[in-house]
Image (cartoon, rainbow, N blue to C red):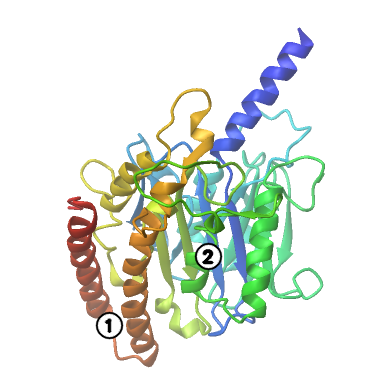
Amino acid sequence: MKSLKFVITIWLLLFTYQLIACTTYIISGKFTPDGKPILFKNRDTDMVKNSLVLFTDGKYKYMGVVNGSEKGWDKSVWGGYNEKGFAIINSAAYNNNIDDTTSFKGMDGVLMKKALMVCSCLEDFEKFLDTLKKPYGVNSNYGVIDAYGGAAYYETGNFKYIKVDANDPATAPDGIIIRTNHSMSSDLSKGFGFNRFETARLILSEAAKAKKLTPEYLMKSIPRSLYHARIGRDLSHNMPAKRDVPKYEFFVDYIPRLSTTSSFMIVGVNDKDKVDETMMWTILGFPLTSPAIPAWLSAGEVPRALAMDKEYESPICTASLKFKEDCFPLIIDHGTNYINLSAVINKEKKGYLQMLMPLEKTIFDKTNLVIKEIEKGTKSKEDIRLLYSWIDEFLSTKYKELFKYDLF
């Protein structure tokens, strides 16, 4: 009986891990080309319908990724930032709470929502944790940045947290900290995500050496990486010949995975007096079938493509999930462990990723021009809204042209 219980426990843990297997990182503003800190999360969950939502129910206004089509969707936030430039993300840490029998759990998203409502900086977040009733009901690595140059992870269990500072050369000599599904302060013989951790480490290390720690490069390279550090294999080097001839590859422990539902990056500021310049790049849906789209809380709205509609879904996420079906068409005999690489990339250049990347490049080019003008003080929230309108129209037109798909 004990052995059966053990098997069931391990199975449930592995099943949960497959669903909640986020890859995250922080980069201190001291090491980025423009001096702005970066906070990133590749989100994995069984809640596949994600949207970007603005909230006004706290001390501070805030914006974050939420689960759509779920009762109580507005009770949790899975990453975002507020009007003070305080930003937070998390990754589940499966080596926290190992011997803890506390039944109170599942509060990770609730905690982030509450923090966004009331915290303006890292010190506020620490006070928030110190005064929060225990047990917290969480097992997370919380990544946090603020408008004062703060950048740190808080490895948090039910009863304590440990701060890991990205500005401390002793712990982050290159200003980069990565967290997947284990806390470095806990038992490293337990936990998950070690393969994805190593993949992210290699990509970020090379990007730092090449001075490419920019939002555009990182959004393209990490959530879309087809490299597996453990086996040293890059699927992009084994490109199928044709789009319509399926080619299946075993697809487990890559950064993008079957359970990836969104990827987002919060770009902070290098001047506390310019907090309105804080912004967010968001990929909703499967990163290999969806583009990155910018949003600013200071604009008072988000692009229609990212926003939750009356069905509690975002148009771009709905499209991505439809395209994703071509990437994982096998549904029996563990078939979802295998990706149809032909649908993603192929020598005909008709894969979803190949067709979407030029669109994303155009969006980045136009957005980067707007960002430069915002930094000069010559662009307002109305200009950002005009950019949103252009993005929505551009994507709508291109989706009809390339995919015969009506986005709106």
* Residue beneath the point at 51% across and 82% down: 272
> In the image, is residue 120 above or below residue 340?
below
Indicate the amino acid at tag 1: Ser
Please report whichever mark, 2 or 1, sits nearer to the chain's N-terminal start: 2
Answer with the quarter of the image where residue 19 lies: top right
In the figure, residue 52 lies in which quadrant? bottom left
Q: Who is closer to the viewer here, 324 or 24? A: 324
2 or 1: mark nearer the eye: 2
Q: State the image coordinates of residue 101 (x, y, percent, origin top left).
A: 73, 28
Find residue 303 and report its image quarter.
Answer: bottom left
Compared across the picture, whether 118 is left or right of 51 comes to: right
Per the model, the C-alpha gap separating discs 2 and 1 is 30 Å
Can residue 130 be seen in this snapshot? Answer: no
Q: Residue at x 70, y 56 (%)?
A: 198
- Quickly name the residue at label 1: 380
Q: Looking at the picture, how far across and down is residue 95, in whole percent?
A: 74, 41
In screen coordinates, is 171 left or right of 131?
right
Instruction: Decide which of 260, 75 is in the foreground and name it.
Output: 260
186 horizontally vs 268: left or right: right
Q: Which mark is residue 221?
A: 2
Indicate the secondary structure of the residue bearing disc 2. helix
State which quarter of the image contains the N terminus. top right
As rendered, which of 97 and 215 lies closer to the eye?
215
Q: Residue at x 71, y 49 (%)?
A: 194
Quick one: 224 or 246, which is closer to the camera? Answer: 246
Q: Looking at the picture, how far across and down is residue 182, in whole percent?
A: 71, 47
Q: Can the viewer see residue 213 in this picture?
A: yes
How packed mark 1 is, by other alpha carbons closer than 10 Å (few <14, some 14-19, many 20 or more), is few
- The three-letter amino acid code for the residue at tag 2 is Ser
> Secondary structure under badge 1?
loop
Q: Kindly identify which numbered label has been placed on residue 218.
A: none
Residue 30 falls left or right of residue 61: right
